[in-house]
Amino acid sequence: MKTGAEPALTVVTYNIHKGFSALNGRLVVHEIRERLRSLSPDVVFLQEVQGAHSRHSRRHLAWPEAAQHEFLAHEGEHSAYGMNAEYRDGHHGNAIVSRYPILKSENLDISHHALECRGLLHCEMAVPGWDEPLHCINVHLGLWARSRRFQLEWLCERIRESVPEGAPLVVAGDFNDWRGTASKLLGSELGLAEAFKSVSGRHARSFPARLPMLTLDRIYVRGLKVGATERLSEGLWSRLSDHAALAARLSR
C-alpha cells in the first residue's frame, strides 16, 4: 500500500566523456558537477565515468581525489559504479548517482567483442512513499549495429528476469542508436516508452553537444508518467562533454 504523496522525479542521463571537453582539451569535471547540481536531479545516469586514472591524476592539478561518480554526488547522496573497461592507467564505466538509498546494484558485462568494453548497471532504490523499489538501468551500447542488437537482446532479457512487470523502471544512457532501433524493440517487446518521443513525437538530438544532430542518448520508462523533458545543450553545457545531457520529469 502506498504511503503519502508520491514525489515526482527528475532524472538525467549524461555521457560525461571521462570529465574532459569534447576534444579532450580541458578538464571540465568541476564544471559538470556545478551544472548537474543546478538541476537538483533525483537520479543521474552517467556514462564514460573515470573510476581512476593515474596519469591524469599526476598531469592535472585539479584532478579530483575521489572517483568521478563520488565527486559528482552531493553530500549525503548515494552512488554505484560499474567498471566497463580496465587498462594500465585506470578504468572507466557507468555510474548512477541517486538522492535515494540504493538497495541493490549489479554491473553486467555486455561486451560483444574485445574492441569495445560495454556494461549494464542495474540499481534498485528506495523512493519515499513508494511501495516498491524504483529500478534504474544505465547502459552504454556499442558503436556497431550488430553489437547493439546483441546488447539490446541482453537488456531485454535482464528486464524480463529481474524487473517485475508492474515495477517503476527507467532505462537510460548512451544507446549509440541513431536509427531508432532500440525504441521499436523496447516498445514492442517490453512496453517501454522513450520520454522525449512521448512528449514531442521524436527522440532528442544529443550529439555532438555544440550542434546536436544524432539521437544517441535516451530515457526509457515503464510504469511512470513523463512530464517535462529538456535537452541541455545551450551555453556552458555545449562546452563540456561531447554529448548533451537529457533530463525528464517523471511521476507514478
Image (cartoon, helix red, strand yellow):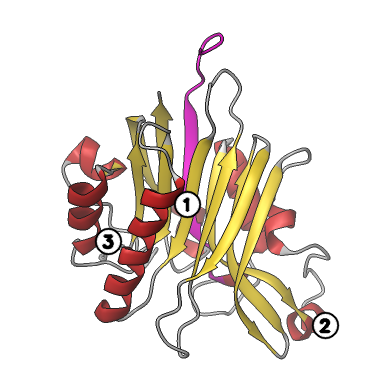
Q: Are marks 1 and 3 in contact (CB under 8 Å)?
A: no
Residue drawn at (25%, 60%), measured in percent from left and top? 182
| Residue 88 versus residue 199 in the image, above or below | below
Q: For marks 3 and 2, give the one nearer the viewer.
A: 3
Query: Distance of mark 2 from mark 1, alpha carbons?
Result: 33 Å
Q: Is residue 6 magenta?
A: yes
187 relative position to 93: left or right = left
The residue at the point 50 percent across, 80 percent down is 117
> Can residue 246 be seen in the rendering of this structure?
no
Identify residue for label 1.
137
Q: Give the residue furthest to the top.
A: 4
Q: Marks 1/3: CA distance? A: 19 Å
Which residue was labeled with disc 2?
A: 58
Question: The C terminus is located in which quarter?
Answer: top left
Q: Is mark 1 on a helix, strand or loop?
A: strand
Question: 212 or 190: nearer the eye?
Answer: 190
Indicate the position of residue 198 as horizontal and vertical percent values: 22, 38
The residue to which callout 3 is attached is 215
Q: Is mark 2 on a helix, strand or loop?
A: helix
